[in-house]
Image: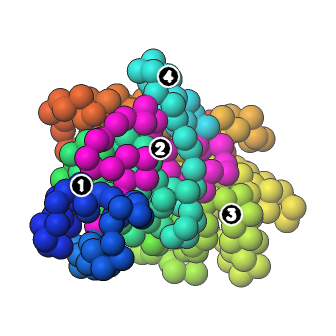
Amino acid sequence: MSTIKDVARLAGVSLSTASYALSGDSKVSQKTRLKVLEAAKQLNYQKNGFAMDLKKSSTKTIALIFWDLAGPYYSELIKGVQEVTIANGYDLIACSSFGQSSTGMRFLKEKRVDGAIISSQNIDDQAILDAAREGFPIILLDQHLEGDYITHVMIDNKQGGRMAADYLIGLGHKQIGMISGPFSSYASRNRYLGFQESLKAHGLEEQHRWVMHGRMNRKDGYQATKTLILQGDLPTAVVYGNDEMAIGGLEAFRESGIRVPDDISIIGFDDIELAQYVNPGLTTIRQPKYEMGNLAAHVMFQALRGDIVNKSYQLQLELIERNSCASM
């Protein structure tokens, strides 16, 4: 990551002149200003949004950047982060990362906060690598990217996919489908790979007509389940990429007169609050959402203090049995 000192050196000017030129101060001639701007362009230098490198000051703010702020999954995670940030006298800004001009992307590029906790698959890896540096730590939630000043707080999504399929196979199911999230998502891809591993380990063949992908929301779960039903040849059980998709699937089965779990068993992933209140109660793989946010925030403040932190932390999953699965 280039600094203003690098820009000044390449342009052949003093540090203060480079600072004035980059801020558009009239003290600097147009010729010198253009020379500094050209040097900044060559070095891909980006000015801090709130403070120049000459005098770095803390914003006392942490950014929490999500791909999508909608959905019940994020509420517990945000609560876990918020409690720690408040306790440390910091503000928390939660924002989305849709597009290069989004608030989340500006925070990363311009360092308008002191650090970022990211749970978003649509931010380019290079943008994260460029942003992370000493004094600006980045915590990635449930996604993997190696780089300096980057820490991961994760669950084993592949293990979760195996747990879900293993559970259904243990109940005697041999015809199992999966309605997964997008394969471009690190979490979704690994849950699906875990599902595949379980089938293979038990000598079962994956039936591609029973495997579908969609976005991790109720609508896509509903639509994918409708497509599954229209094929006319249902599996005896379905693993869903998350609880929201599974709840959409419940509605699709109900509309078609297909009873869960009498006619088909389903299992979700996440254990959102609604999972226990739907009828039947949703069996699911619980991931510790509050704990993930809480740990990420603790690690963030350790990094800001200059403490040594691990490169990766992994939280445990848990099978939550309710009433949406039945033995064969």
Residue shown at 28% from the left, 53% from the top:
132
Q: Can residue 239 be seen in the rendering of this structure? A: no
Nearer to us of marks 3 and 2 is 2
Distance between the alpha carbons at the discs numbered 4 and 3: 36 Å
Distance between the alpha carbons at the discs numbered 1 and 3: 57 Å
- How many residues crowd around disc 3 within 10 Å: few (fewer than 14), some, or many (20 or more)? many
Q: Which numbered circle lies on residue 86? A: 4
- How many residues crowd around disc 4 within 10 Å: few (fewer than 14), some, or many (20 or more)? few
Name the residue beneath numbered marker 3: 221
Q: Is residue 66 left or right of residue 36?
A: right
Residue shown at 71% from the left, 58% from the top:
218
Q: Position of residue 74 (x, y in %)?
A: 58, 43
**Local SS, label 4:** helix
Name the residue beneath numbered marker 1: 16
Distance between the alpha carbons at the discs numbered 2 and 4: 13 Å
Classify 294 as above or below 178.
Answer: above
Q: Determine contact: label 4, label 1, CB under 8 Å.
A: no
Q: Label 2 is placed on what type of residue?
A: Ala
- How many residues crowd around disc 1 within 10 Å: few (fewer than 14), some, or many (20 or more)? few
Residue shown at 66% from the left, 49% from the top:
71
Q: Position of residue 7 (x, y in %)?
A: 20, 67
Q: Label 3 is placed on what type of residue?
A: Gly
Nearer to us of marks 1 and 3 is 1
Q: Is residue 97 left or right of residue 26?
A: right
Q: Determine contact: label 2, label 1, CB under 8 Å.
A: no
